[in-house]
Amino acid sequence: MSDTYVLVHGAWHTGAELEATAAHLREAGHTVHCPTLAGNRPGDDRARTGLDDAIGSLVAFLDAHDLREVRLVGHSYGGMVISGAAERAAQRIRRLVYVNAFVPLPGECLNDLVPPHYVALFDAVAQAQDNAVVLPFEIWREAFINDADLALARSSYAQLNPHPYRTFTDPIRLQRPLAELPVGKSYLNCRQDTAMPHGLPWHPRLSERLGLFRLVECDGSHEMWFSQPGALADAILRAGRD
């Protein structure tokens, strides 16, 4: 049976970086879309784009393509975006899949969910770069893509783009906690992901906010989109199936 997946990228990414994983899902017979959110497109105003803009761009994509029964997959920052879209496009969504992604409560922003040293780093970078943030290579290499060799770490880092900081500081507008939404939910936990320190983990700290959810785990880093796209696709299929 063919299902429809929409893969929603994290910070510093575009949909293009998710295409290697999408190809494996398509080979398995599924329809897959990889939109790029507002704020990460060429020419977007990084200084002014906020979280509502990013969420609105995803909802507009679902509407424009008249997508229904969607498995909406959000990675990292993408969890903030699919959480907002879950209310605004509820009639189009079959299941939410969080891939080591943020699960906010009403009124929280992304910076509420990360360690203080990240907030301090992002504040300083944004102040120096017109409210856009970039990730230092050392953090990317050691914490985000620790299952890759140095060459892949460098080539993947070169594909990243500055990210609008307002999407990290804007509080999300949700009418109720995600646990109360009557939609299927899954959390995919990549076990070697240290983008969040294991003392402040993705799972179960954030996953349990989903209420009733399916847990799927696999071995890999935060950036399996680059390092292990096939294994990540297999895990997404386990997370997304009925």
Image (cartoon, grey):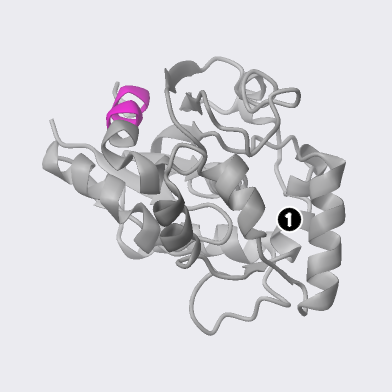
Magenta region's main secondary structure?
helix
Percent of width and height locating residue 43: 53, 85
Q: Point out the image quarter for the N terminus.
A: top left
Disc 1 secondary structure class? helix
Magenta-drawn segment? 234-239
Percent of width and height locating residue 214: 46, 16
The residue at 36%/53% (across/down) is 18
**Pick the front one: 206 or 182:** 206
Asked whether the viewer can see residue 36, the reply is yes
**Pick the front one: 92 or 193:** 193
The residue at 70%/60% (across/down) is 167
Q: Is residue 6 magenta?
A: no
**Pick the front one: 56 or 145:** 145
Q: Is residue 156 left or right of residue 233?
A: right
Q: Is residue 213 left or right of residue 120?
A: left
Q: Is residue 86 left or right of residue 107?
A: left
Q: Which residue is mark 1?
A: 168
**Amino acid on which disc 1 is placed:** Phe
Q: Is residue 238 magenta?
A: yes
